[in-house]
Amino acid sequence: MLKIKDLHTHIEQFHILQGVNLEVPDNSVTVVLGRNGAGKTTTIRSVMGFYPNMSGEILFQGKSIAKLPPYTVAKQGIGYVPEDQDIFAGLTVEENMRVAMRREDDTTLERQEWLLDLFPDLREAWKRKGGHLSGGQKQMLSIARALVNETPLLLVDEPSKGLAPIMVEKVMEAMNVIRETTTILLVEQNFIMASQLGDYFYMIDEGRTVFQGEMQLLKDDEVLRKKYLGIA
Amino acid sequence: MELHLTLIFNGLATGMLIFLLAAGLSLIFGLMSVLNFAHGALFMFGAYMGTWVYILIGGWNSPWGNLNFFVGMIAAALIGVVLGYLVERFTVRQVYGNHLRQILITTGVMLVVAELVKVFWGPNLIRVVQPEFLQGHFLVGDVRLTYYRVFIILFSTMILILLLFMLKKSKIGVVVRAGVENSQMVQALGINIRKVFTLVFIFGTMLACIGGYMWGPFQGQVNPGMGLDLMLIAFIVVAIGGLGSVAGSAIAAVLVGLSEAYMAYYFPPGSLAVNMLIMAAVLLIKPTGLLGAGR
Amino acid sequence: MKTTTKVTAYTNPSSGLNPLRIITWQKGAWIVCCLMLFAVPLLITKNSYLFLLTNIFIWSVFAMSYNLLLGFTGIISFGHAMFFGIGAYSLALTARHVPGGEVGFILAILATVVICFVLSLIVGLLSLRLRDTFYALITLAVATIFVIIAEQWRSMTMGNDGFNFTASLSRDLFGFINLLDRRHVYYIALIFLIGMFLLLKRFIDSPVGRTLQAIRDNEARAASLGYAVLNYKLISNILAGVMAGLAGVVYAISIRFVSPDSVLGVENTIDVLLMTVIGGVGTLLGPIIGAAVVEVSSHYLMGLANIHPIFERWVILFGVVFILIILFFPAGIVGTIKQKFLSKKKGVSS
C-alpha cells in the first residue's frame, strides 16, 4: 500500500529524518514505534507533503506521491489524523465532517452514517462546537473526519495520547472495525494499544529505521522493548 | 434626544459603509494572515471606476438616473473582481507565509493603484450625487432620515446577512471558517487552500469596491485621499472585531461609525484618537478582538 | 585536515594575507570617498546641486534608521515619519520662538532626543508584544494622530500651510556656522551622515546588534535561548526613533520650512521605505544608495513634468520598481550585488 524509501527531511537547519525505510502491506496495521523525538510524527507529516524540501521516495499504491502538496496527497485517498487532532474549534461536529467531504452525495453520506454508528458519541454531539468536545470525542471526530471519503490508507498519529483509559478502549474498538476495510499506519507510544492492533512494527530511532518485524516478535522480546522503548 | 437619534442614525450609516470595507479585509487577514495595505487603494479605485461609469452613462440627471446608479455599482463590483484577481495572482500569492514581504508588496500595490487613479481621473475630486429616488429625506418624529443613508443601512445589512448565511451554510463558507482557524489541516483534508485564498481575496476586493462606490454619493464626492483615510479606520475595525470574524467586523464597524458620528459633531479632530482608544480598550480586555478566534 | 591548511598557507603566503589586503583596500576606498565628498562644495558652486546632495545625506540617515527596524530587527513601521517630523518641528519652533541661536539649537536637539526616546519607548511597549502586523497598524495610527495635531494646533504650527523660518536661522551659530550658507549646511549633513553611519556600524557589530539579527532570523529560537526579545526590539526601536528625529532636525535646517505633508505625513515613511527596499534591506550601505537613487530620480522626473504631465505621476514608477524588487530581488541593489560578488568568489575558490 505504502512504501517509503530512504526518506530524509530537514526542518530548518535540523536533519530530522536521516533515512527512514518503511513498508505498509495491504490490509494490515503497521505501527511505528520509537522514543519521543525519534522522528515518528515527522515521518507521517512527510508522507502528507508538509515538507516540500524532503528527499527520498514515497510510493502509494505504486505511484510516487513524494513532494506532492498536502491536498493532492489527501485526494489520492490518504486520511490523516494529526497528533493534536486539529479539530476546527469554531465549527460544529457536522461542519467539521463537511469540510472533509469531497462530494456530498449518497455514498459519502452513507459512509458518514457508518462512521456515526461506529462513534455514537459523535452523533450525540452532532451540533456541538469542536472546541466544546472532550478529548476522546475530539479524537473520534478526527478519525471520522479522515475517513468520510473513500480512504484506502489511514495515517494516525498517537490516538491514545492524553485520553482516559475508557476512551482509549473505545478508540481501539473502533480501529478494530476500521482495519477491516482500511490499511492503517499508526504511530503509537502506548504499547498495549500498539501490540493489540499491530500486525507489523517499525522501530525508528534518531531519524532512522533501526528495526522491523512482525508484532509478535516484539511482544516476545523484552530486551528489545527495553532498548528502544524503555518499557518492560 | 433628537440630536442623539440623528447622530445614532448617521453613525449607523457610516458604520455599515465601513463594514463593507472591513469585511473583506478581515476575511483576508483572518484566512491568509495578510494585512492588505492595498485594500484602501482598491476601495478608492472601485469608487472612481463606478462613479466614472455612473457619470459616463448620464449620471443622476438623466431619465435613467436610478438605473444608472446601479449600473455604476455593477461596474465597481466588476472592477473589484478583476483587480482582486490580478493583485492576488501576481503579487500577494508570491509571498504567502512571509508577513514582512506581504506588507511590503501590498504597500507597493497601494502606491501603484492610488497613482493609477490620478493618471486616469486626475488629482482633483469628482462630485457625485445620489440618484433621484434616494434624494431627500423623511421625518420620524423630529429626526431627519435621509433616504440615501437608509439605503446604505439596508443594503449593507443585506450584504451582512448574505455573508453570514454563506459562511454558515455553504460548503465554501464552512471551508473558509475552517481555514481561518487552521489552514494546514484544511489542506490535509484534500482542499487546495490557495484556490480558496484567491476566491476570498477577489470577494473581499469586490465588497470594498462596492463600498467605495457607495461612499461617493454619501460624501458628495470621490477624491484620491479617501483610500488611506478609510483604510486606517478599517484596520481599526478589523482589530476590534477580531481577525476573520465577519460578525465581529459588523459590530466593530457600527461602534466606530457611532464614535465617528459623535466626534464629528463634538470634536472632529479627535475622532481617530477616540477610535484608537476604543481599539486599545478592546484589545486590552480581549487581545483577539470582540469575536476573534484565539490563535 | 589541520595539516593541509597549514601546507597551503605555507606554500602560498599571499592567500593568507589576502583578507587583510581587502580590508585595507576597502578602508582606503572609504576614506577617498569621504574626501571626495568633502571636496564637492569647493568644485560645485551651484546651490541646487549642493541642496540635492545635502538632502540625500539627510534622507540616507533617515533611511538608515528605518533600515535598523526593517532590515536588522525585522519589524515594519508605517509611522517612522513622526520622529522625523518631531525633529523638524522642534528645530523650526525653537528657531522661531527661542531667541539666541545656540540656545534654541541645543534646545531643539535636546527636545528631539527626549521626545523621540519617550515616544518610541511608549509605542514600542504598546505594540511590540503584539504580532508584527499590528505593529505596522499601530505605528500608522499614532503617526496619523501626530499629523492631525500638527494640522489642528494652528497657533503653534500654522496648520496645513506650515511655516517658513528662514529669517530666524542663525548666521553665526557657535561663532562659525552660517545656517543660511548652503555649503555650511552641506558639511553639517555630511558629517552627520558619517557620524551616524559609524555609530550604526558599531551598533550592528555589537553583541546587542548581533542578537537583534538573531531575533530577526528566528524569534522563537532566540527567545528559547533566553534572550529578552522585547528588550532588544525596544532598544532598536528607540535608537531608530532618535536617529530619525535627529535627521529631521538637520532636514529642517536644509529646507527651512515645515508642514505636516513635508515632514510628518505617512508619505515620508513610504519614501524611506522605498529607499530602504530599493537600496537593500539589512545592508549598511543600502539606504544611502536607495536615498540617492530615489532623490535623484524623483528630482529629474519631476523636472520632466513640464514635458508631459504623465511625469507628475512618477511615484507609479517607484511603485512598480518596488514591487519588482520585492518579488525578484528582495535583497535590493546593494544586497544583490553583494550576493553576486560573494557567489563569484565562492565559485572561484571551489
Image (cartoon, rainbow, N blue to C red):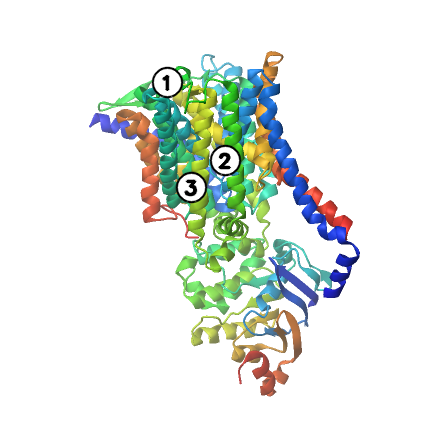
Judged left or right of residue C186, residue C336 is right
Which SS class for mark 1? loop
Q: Position of residue C4 (x, y in %)?
A: 76, 63
Mark 2 secondary-structure assignment: loop
Q: Position of residue B167 (x, y in %)?
A: 46, 45
Residue at 43%, 46% in the rendered image: C235
**Nearer-N-terminus badge (1/2):** 2
Task: Sort mark 2 into few (<14), some (14-19) or many (20+) by Cα contacts within 10 Å.
Answer: many
Q: Quadrant of residue C126?
A: top left
User: Where B287 falls versus B24 (above or below)?
Assistant: below
Are the numbered discs 3 and 2 placed on the same chain, yes or no?
no
State which mark lies toward you, 3 or 1. 3
Residue at mark 2 = B37
Q: x and y percent of residue C12 in the render?
A: 78, 54
Q: Give whichever of B111, C337 is nearer the camera.
A: C337
The amino acid marked with disc number 1 is Gln
Label 2 resides on the chain identified as B
Q: Which residue lies under the disc numbered 3?
A: C238
Give the CA distance from mark 1 to mark 2: 34 Å
Which residue was labeled with disc 1? B135
Between disc 3 and disc 2, the foreground one is 3
C-alpha span from label 3 to label 1: 53 Å
* Residue at the far right in the pictured view: C11
Instruction: Estimate the x, y position of residue B172 in percent, counting from the top left.
Output: 52, 46
Q: Estimate the spatial distance between the alpha carbons at disc 3 and disc 2, rounded to whole Å.
A: 25 Å
Q: Are marks 3 and 1 on the same chain?
A: no
> In terms of secondary structure, where does tag 3 sit?
helix
Dot 3 alpha-carbon crowd within 10 angstroms: few under 14, some 14 to 19, many 20 or more: many
**Residue A137 to residue A91: above or below:** below
Residue type at mark 2 is: Phe
Q: Are marks 3 and 2 in contact (CB under 8 Å)?
A: no
